[in-house]
Image: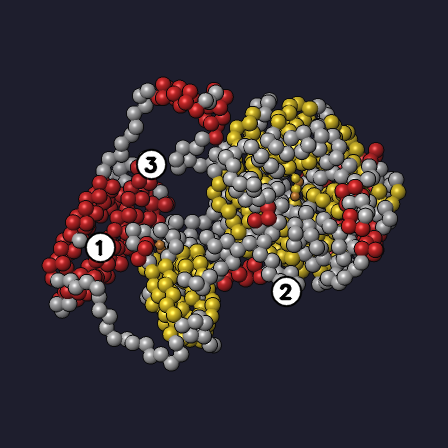
């Protein structure tokens, strides 16, 4: 005991007061040559490494939000380092974040129920950052679920999912999420036509009763939530609407959607009919859908649009009458439609073709104004002829899918699926500028802020569908592959392959890292899902267990290194609702809470309050503990739920401790504490001799250390009171608790000191 205390004090001293040793740069050149030789690296490899390597503590210039495909999550990583930072659970329970485990996030997932059923995954496709004036504002990100047409809102203040809305009409979606230039609306287009009701409708009535559509979800930026009551949907023919994009600049107020299978073919391979793939690609053209959302909004506001299924629906009849929707032929089973940064052109990639098609917004508007239509589709929607709307077509390679823009005017990049390459070209001149092979089968691609009104260029990521032989094999299911490409020069240079261990990532978007200003802690007692004070918050010293409305409510707290309460006694059959508040103010001091066999796993970040409710249906002993290694005595952050059989009388008599302490033990501990305090005083002396007030993270560390020292003082008082009564058992235990708080103080002091040293603090005169 004594020995370990001394050792710990000595180690603390070295850690806190000791010197930093800087490595010598000698022989760096020859060491580098040796590494290159041993690992078979070329100079080009070294250059690529130097462009992506980020030294410890370094930061990335861009943060990417990538779809996580059917994992129902989204993923954040940095560029150029390609280091994965976080998966955020959206449609799928995720235990680390307690998502779908605590009551608060269960309520978010419950918003996504369909026909009363919990849907615990999502096929996420297209993340979209919120925008102001056509540029990312770093406030929110939205993501769609293709399989179960839903949209989720993630707040970038804390990177948590806040809301899920279910489309009131569709049975799938693909063309979401795409936002209008001020995030007035989030676009969500259906993909597989279906009846708007949940009734059975035979396929023989496909043309009459199955429908596609496009929803404009109204977003309220002030409260950070979608307003279903102010959202509206365009009824569309049963074509498979594909991707969307919103107009910008001169095309502000308009939306654009591709489609495929305008053949309205319904398959039936099992009945000997040719399969969908034959019937859906037999025509030479499909339709670009052009919608006027600004005018539609006026009609909605004027009360001229009726509600169906509880939501505004603009019927095709109304769209035709009011001039809200037009079609333009596009060749051939197209996929992406992308509005150019200046808003003047729409670029459509013809998946089964080798061309990208550049449409002119001005020509489209002129045709609408002149009522210059070549014909109408079977539903009476006016069709503008391709010849009238097209600016040019450019041969970019076989199977073009998606486009992203460069900072250089007119320059863009197109992903070429069949040829597995990226083509760099200029839509204004029609010239192909460069091509780069990709491994393999690229889907989407992404440049930095590449779908905004002011793209940054610099880097491009190819989101590849297959990785085949790029990585060490890990079984038949391969990781996905994101390839980082330097586009700052005239030729594209491949820099890095990143295996993505969740899939399938469809689209991604990259934002300048400095636009994100996430919080490091919550206000104490915060419900992060409603963004309000939790009714279940608890302050230090106010922990309690109360029985209300037949539920045992446990109001508890977490702080290094104990859970209060440490024992929870309930009777078999009782419903237990445990509410935990993390009292920490220190950055990154997250505590977890897991309990044996009750499917309980919570994440409680500093300030947060979360709850878990379950029925204690079986008498027994259920240990619980903290799941984050939060401090040296993290393993001791523990407790028991005791589920007593009905009628059992709890025994409140004294508990025999396993070890008996003497006066000598107590005095030795006090001596250790006094020595530890000396070390702490030196560190405090160092910190306060510096201009630490100029460093907000250090200021909050100092606040936290002051808290811990306050707790140490309290324990010291209790130890001395017990010693005065000759109760050396409790005196020793409280003296040890006093020391534990000192260790926590020292730990924080070390963090503050390291921070100051790394940030070149200066000595200040007093
Ligand atoms: S998809 S590979 Cu956007 Cu869902 Cu194109
Ligand atoms: Cu708290 Cu480990």
Residue 523 in the image: x percent, y percent? Answer: 43, 57
| Residue 739: mark | 1
User: Who's the residue at 71% across and 39% down the image?
Assistant: 335
86 relative position to 208: left or right: left
Furthest residue in direction right, as rendered: 375
Residue 365 in the image: x percent, y percent? Answer: 79, 39
Task: State how far apart marks 2 and 1 are (Cα).
Answer: 54 Å
First along the sequence among labels 2 and 1? 2
Q: Is mark 3 within 8 Å of ligand 2?
A: no
Q: What is the quadrant of residue 714 in the picture?
A: bottom left
Looking at the image, which is closer to me, 697 or 87?
87
Q: What is the quadrant of residue 18 in the picture?
A: top left
Which mark lies nearer to you, 2 or 3?
A: 2
Task: State how far apart marks 1 and 3 are (Cα).
Answer: 28 Å
Looking at the image, which is closer to me, 757 or 116?
116
Query: Splitting the image into four quadrants, where does ligand 1 fall?
Result: top right
Question: In the rendered image, is residue 102 in sight?
Answer: yes
| Residue 80: mark | none
10 Å crowding of disc 1: few (<14), some (14-19), many (20+) = many
User: Who's the residue at 25% across and 55% down the image?
Assistant: 740
Are the residues flagged by discs 1 and 3 in contact, CB closer than 8 Å? no
| Residue 116: mark | 2
Residue 80 in the image: x percent, y percent? Answer: 50, 33
Residue identifier under label 3: 758
């Amino acid at each position: 005991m004594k020995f370990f205390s001394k050792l710990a004090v000595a180690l603390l001293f070295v850690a806190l007061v000791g010197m930093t040793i800087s490595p010598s740069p000698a022989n760096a050149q020859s060491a580098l040559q040796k590494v290159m030789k041993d690992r078979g690296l070329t100079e080009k490899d070294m250059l690529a490494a130097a462009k992506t390597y980020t030294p410890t503590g370094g930061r990335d210039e861009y943060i990417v939000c990538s779809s996580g495909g059917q994992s129902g999550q989204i993923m954040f990583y940095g560029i150029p380092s390609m280091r994965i930072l976080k998966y955020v659970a959206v449609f799928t329970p995720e235990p680390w974040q307690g998502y779908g485990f605590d009551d608060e996030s269960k309520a978010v997932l419950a918003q996504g129920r369909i026909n009363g059923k919990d849907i615990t995954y999502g096929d996420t496709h297209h993340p979209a950052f919120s925008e102001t004036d056509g540029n990312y504002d770093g406030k929110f990100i939205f993501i769609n679920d293709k399989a179960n047409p839903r949209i989720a809102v993630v707040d970038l203040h804390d990177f948590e999912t806040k809301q899920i809305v279910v489309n009131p009409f569709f049975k799938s979606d693909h063309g979401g999420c795409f936002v209008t230039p001020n995030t007035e609306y989030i676009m969500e287009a259906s993909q597989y036509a279906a009846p708007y009701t949940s009734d059975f409708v035979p396929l023989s009535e496909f043309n009459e009763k199955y429908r596609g559509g496009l929803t404009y979800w109204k977003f309220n930026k002030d409260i950070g939530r979608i307003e279903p009551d102010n959202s509206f949907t365009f009824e569309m023919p049963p074509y498979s609407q594909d991707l969307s994009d919103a107009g910008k600049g001169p095309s502000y107020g308009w939306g654009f959607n591709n489609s495929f299978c305008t053949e309205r073919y319904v398959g039936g391979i099992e009945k000997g009919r040719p399969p969908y793939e034959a019937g859906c690609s037999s025509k030479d053209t499909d339709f670009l859908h052009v919608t006027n959302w600004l005018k539609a909004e006026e009609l909605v506001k004027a009360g001229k649009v009726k509600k169906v299924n509880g939501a505004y629906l603009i019927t095709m009849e109304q769209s035709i009458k009011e001039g809200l929707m037009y079609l333009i032929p596009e060749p051939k089973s197209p996929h992406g439609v992308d509005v150019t940064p200046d808003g003047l052109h729409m670029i459509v990639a013809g998946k089964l073709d080798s061309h990208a098609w550049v449409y002119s917004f001005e020509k489209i508007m002129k045709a609408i104004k002149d009522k210059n239509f070549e014909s109408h589709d079977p539903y009476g929607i006016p069709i503008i002829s391709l010849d009238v709307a097209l600016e040019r077509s450019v041969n970019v390679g076989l199977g073009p899918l998606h486009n992203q823009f460069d900072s250089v005017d007119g320059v863009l990049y197109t992903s070429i699926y069949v040829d597995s390459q990226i083509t760099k070209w200029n839509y204004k001149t029609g010239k192909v500028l460069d091509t780069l092979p990709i491994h393999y089968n690229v889907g989407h691609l992404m440049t930095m802020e590449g779908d905004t009104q002011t793209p940054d260029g610099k880097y491009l990521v190819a989101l590849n569908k297959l990785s085949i032989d790029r990585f060490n094999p890990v079984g038949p299911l391969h990781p996905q592959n994101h390839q980082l490409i330097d586009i700052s020069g005239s030729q594209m240079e491949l820099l890095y392959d990143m295996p993505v261990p969740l899939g399938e990532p469809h689209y991604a978007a990259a934002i300048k890292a400095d636009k994100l200003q996430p919080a490091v802690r919550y206000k104490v007692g915060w419900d992060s899902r409603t963004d309000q004070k939790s009714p279940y918050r608890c302050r230090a010293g106010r922990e309690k267990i109360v029985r209300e409305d037949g539920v045992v409510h446990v109001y508890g707290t977490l702080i290094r290194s104990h859970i209060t309460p440490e024992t929870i006694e309930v009777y078999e059959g009782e419903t237990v609702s445990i509410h935990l508040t993390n009292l920490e103010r220190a950055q990154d001091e997250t505590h977890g809470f897991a309990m044996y066999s009750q499917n309980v796993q919570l994440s409680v970040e500093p300030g947060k309050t979360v709850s878990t409710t379950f029925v204690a249906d079986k008498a027994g002993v259920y240990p619980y503990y903290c799941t984050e290694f939060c401090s040296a005595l993290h393993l001791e952050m523990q407790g028991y739920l005791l589920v007593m059989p009905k009628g059992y009388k709890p025994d409140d008599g004294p508990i025999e401790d396993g070890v008996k302490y003497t006066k000598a033990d107590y005095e030795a501990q006090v001596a250790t504490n006094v020595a530890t305090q000396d070390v702490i005083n030196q560190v405090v002396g160092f910190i306060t001799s510096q201009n630490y007030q100029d460093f907000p993270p250090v200021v909050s560390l100092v606040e936290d250390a002051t808290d811990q020292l306050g707790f140490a003082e309290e324990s010291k008082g209790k130890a001395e009171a017990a010693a005065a009564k000759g109760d050396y058992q409790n005196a020793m235990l409280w003296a040890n608790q006093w020391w534990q708080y000192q260790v926590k103080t020292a730990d924080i002091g070390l963090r503050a000191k390291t921070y100051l040293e790394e940030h070149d603090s200066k000595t200040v005169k007093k």
